Amino acid sequence: MLEKRWSRLLVPSLSDMFFLAILAMLCVRGGGVGWSGLLSDADVGWHIRTGEYILDQRRVPHHDLYSFTNPGAVWYAWEWLSDVIGGALHRAAGLKGVVLLAALTIALYAVTLVRRMLSRGVHLCVLLPMALLAVGASSVHFFARPHIFTLLLLSASTWMIEADRERPRSRTWLLVPLTAVWTNLHGGFVSVVAVLGLTTIGVFIEARLSGGPSIRDALRYAKLTLACALASLANPYGWNLHLHIWQYLQSDWILNSVQEFQSPRFRDGGILQFEVLMFAGLIVAGAAWRRKRVVEGLWIVFWAHMALASARHIPVFVAVCAPLIAGQLSDWFSVWIVSRRHNVIRFIDRMARNWLPVCRHTSLLPWAAVAALIATGAPIRWPQDFPKQLFPTELVHAHADLIVRSRVFTTDQWADYLIYTNPQQKVFMDGRSDFYGAAHGTRYVELLNGHWRWQQWLQTYDFDLALLPVPNALAELLKREPGWRILADTGEHVLIVRD
């Protein structure tokens, strides 16, 4: 018995190997796959500086810190707890700490998907391709930003609800304090309330259709939904945070201008993997309803609709629905296997079933790998700055004194980077689209695209510096504008100054 226990600790399972593969993909490899991909969205820059502000001031900000256009205006730092974690890690280990936490969180999220599939008894021949599809589809949003906490917490919460559906457990009420913490990590806490609400509706319908769950079960889930919703009020802004989120998500400008809130474009690899999952999911939803499993059908249809309306919800669809889809596909695959009399097919099936018992345990190998990554930099070249392929790192550092003294017009992503480089930097527009609103966002887009009113906005805000990509409409106009001259041009980034 002791020898068997030691072998389980030393021999990695399937979920361990999956964890290590995702970790290697996000940390070890370069290009857009490794840590440079995690830092390709510079929103993490102002998140880090906000966390450091909270650590220094010991309070959560209620007013703007970074804008020269609307200084001191009301601002909801609704992800303040994530900011504090990121700020503390940045002070302790620099950007290495930030990207390593992001990679660990994403790897753990991937493991929850695999373990949920295993708990459903998914056939290994179905589990592996479905897990890869799920991670690939989710990768459209793999950035070192607070939303990665939502991916992990939503998958874990859905797992708890799935287990509770099979056999009611009192520990499901742990979702209430979890929601309270989640609310301060990321606005995605709304998703677990939505899943619980759909569960309540589905259980009620199931109770009316069959002799399975009872109306009492539906009332229990209704109470749990209400309790989680009330727990979300435990944040520095109270119910005003919920009102702000609602107004933000209802803004036509946000929905039409911010790419991640627009419908997915079915060209990228990750989006195509989502497409496969979605079509499979809609078929599975129909099968679930035929079996009077209304809850699962509601989950799939609702989150598929949300993902089609906004690419931001693709990872949410995956986190909730991928194991459900894998479970039904596995049942159909097993029926097909039984109907086949070919010896090779039956041999593969037998081997896959023999492997299942060694897929569920957790060995020491993942923890040893994480400890090694924390303790040493070799052989990984951890980030010292944001990727220079995406951000004007050389220009910003070479002209840091001038930039911090100037009224700079730049892209919202580069403004995030300027805030990261110097927290004293004041910007025109950064990644906090919920703070700036539609009117200001429209002026930003008109300036960036060289709209006919660009000179009006240039004078209104008294800009004296422009940091822009090449090519860009405004950059070309400023090059020919009297009183402006090129200070530096790398061929990819240009710094234009007003004389």
Image (cartoon, helix red, strand yellow):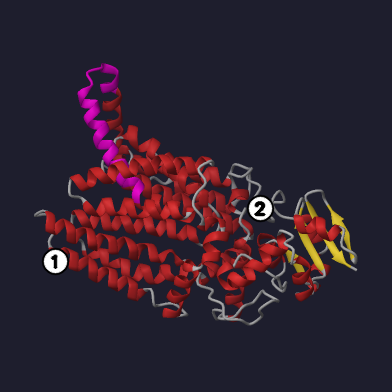
Q: Is residue 46 left or right of residue 181?
A: right
Q: Amino acid at mark 1?
A: Arg
- The dominant secondary structure in magenta is helix
Q: Which residue is mark 2?
A: 383
Instruction: Answer left or right for 302 relative to 334.
Output: right
Front residue of 416 and 281: 281
Return the x and y of residue 287 as percentages of the image width and height: 23, 42
Q: Secondary structure at mark 2?
A: loop
Q: Quadrant of the C terminus?
A: bottom right
Which mark identifies residue 290?
none
Residue denoted by label 1: 216
Q: Which residues are magenta?
A: 321-347
Which residue of the protein is positioned furthest toward the front in this rendering?
A: 452
Task: Report which quarter residue 223 is drawn in.
Answer: bottom left
Q: Nearer the viewer, residue 409 or 94?
A: 409
Task: Sort mark 1 into few (<14), some (14-19) or many (20+) by Cα contacts within 10 Å.
Answer: few
352 relative to 238, above or below = above
Position of 240 with respect to 381 (left or right) is left
